[in-house]
Image (cartoon, rainbow, N blue to C red):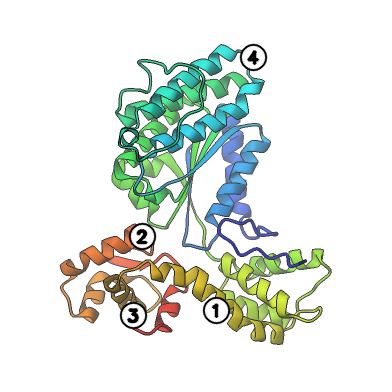
Amino acid sequence: MRNPYAPGAGQRPPELAGRDRELQQFEVVLERVARGRPERSMVVTGLRGVGKTVLLNTFKSMAMQRLWGTGKIEARPDRSIRRPVAAALHMAIRELSPRHRAPERIEEFLGVLKAFAMRDASAAKGTSHWSPGIDVPAARGRADSGDLEIDLTELFVDAAAVATDLGVGIALFIDEMQDVQVQDVSALCAACHELSQSGGPLIVVGAGLPHLPSVLSASKSYSERLFRYARIDRLDREAADLALIAPAEGEGVEFTQEALDALYEAADGYPYFVQAYGKVAWDLALHSPITGEDVRVSAPEAEEELAVGFFGSRYERATPAERDYMHAIASIGDEPVATAEVAEILGRKPSSLSPARDSLIKKGLIYSAERGLIAFTVPHFGKFLRSQPI
């Protein structure tokens, strides 16, 4: 019951170790926007399990502490961002409205927001069920053209104007940003570009897989200068040890050096694995300090849980052809591999394997590290596949 470790999707660990640089960067972004200085929006990238969502949620908390309006969405490849963005900005404005001295300004913006949301083409087909609970008539002639690039830009400008009245900002957080549809990425970049030129206090903070920068640059050539990119990876030894030691100290429990060595070797510094191995080691240890032997005894249970929940659930989503493709990648090694080499192992032409590769990319199981190279989005996935029967 006292176990402090939290291996879960997006769950904040008790000690957010090794992310001081990113937190300081975002602090600078918030401060500059608050002072009316020009500042880029921010994008965090990394593999699965490195803590992108945790960092995004921490950024959101930092913005809320400064009394900013905040909203968050999770992108999906089969859905336009129009209605999710409308819902997120509705939440942000609701946070700001009690402090605004001109209710008519809020109502005016809500009318624009309602018009923007109602222009969702998918709504007419019954595929979108969110209905804006806004008791004002939809505005006309603003953010309602049906062209997402125009509408999103006008909506962002108007939202930023409301925040300016209060001397604060608005932050829109987008998780799984690589799944934003191609045409929507273009609209999002264009809206952010307009804000960067006008100096409006609204920023977009995204999190996604390592290939997200290339997705953005493919949409708009200026996106490389539009966002501040932060690539996060595994923790170094000092940070990984801190993530284990600090929560345990709060419960009066210690680790031997041998246990820390064994845990770092097992987790390889990946934050999710640190929490997973630390949690099982805590549960199986009989007393403090937790020893290397405790870690060795508990490691198989942790690996079994990861095999089912972290690796297995993703593996089960793949078709037989996609699994063959992934096994071929895993047989080569754990670094990014050439698509031509995968085709050679499978005895196929690279072009005939494009459907399997593209489907795996859409499912978020692999990504294109650079042209002609692919890699797993999940750390240690190759090791897991090599232990599975083909």
> Whole-percent x and y of residue 71?
54, 37
**Where residue 101 is drawn, which disc sits there?**
4
Q: Nearer the viewer, mark 2 or mark 4?
A: 2
**Residue under the image location 33 percent in, 45 percent down:** 181
Judging by the rendered image, the residue that carries numbered circle 2 is 363
**Residue under the image location 61 percent in, 70 percent down:** 276
Q: Quadrant of the N terminus?
A: bottom right
> Whole-percent x and y of residue 177?
42, 48
Q: Quadrant of the C terminus?
A: bottom left
Q: Are discs 2 and 4 less than 8 Å apart at CB? A: no
Q: Are discs 1 and 4 less than 8 Å apart at CB? A: no
Judging by the rendered image, the residue that carries numbered circle 1 is 304
Q: Is residue 379 left or right of residue 219?
A: right
Quarter of the image for residue 187 reads: top left
Q: Are discs 1 and 3 less than 8 Å apart at CB? A: no
Q: Nearer the viewer, mark 1 or mark 4?
A: 1
**Residue under the image location 49 percent in, 21 percent down:** 110
Residue type of the residue flagged with mark 4: Arg
Residue type of the residue flagged with mark 1: Glu
Residue 293 visible here: yes
**Alpha carbon of mark 2 to alpha carbon of mark 3: how far?**
21 Å
Residue 35 visible here: no
Q: Are discs 4 and 3 less than 8 Å apart at CB? A: no
**Alpha carbon of mark 1 to alpha carbon of mark 3: how far?**
24 Å
Q: Earlier in the sequence, mark 2 or mark 4?
A: 4
Q: Earlier in the sequence, mark 2 or mark 3?
A: 3
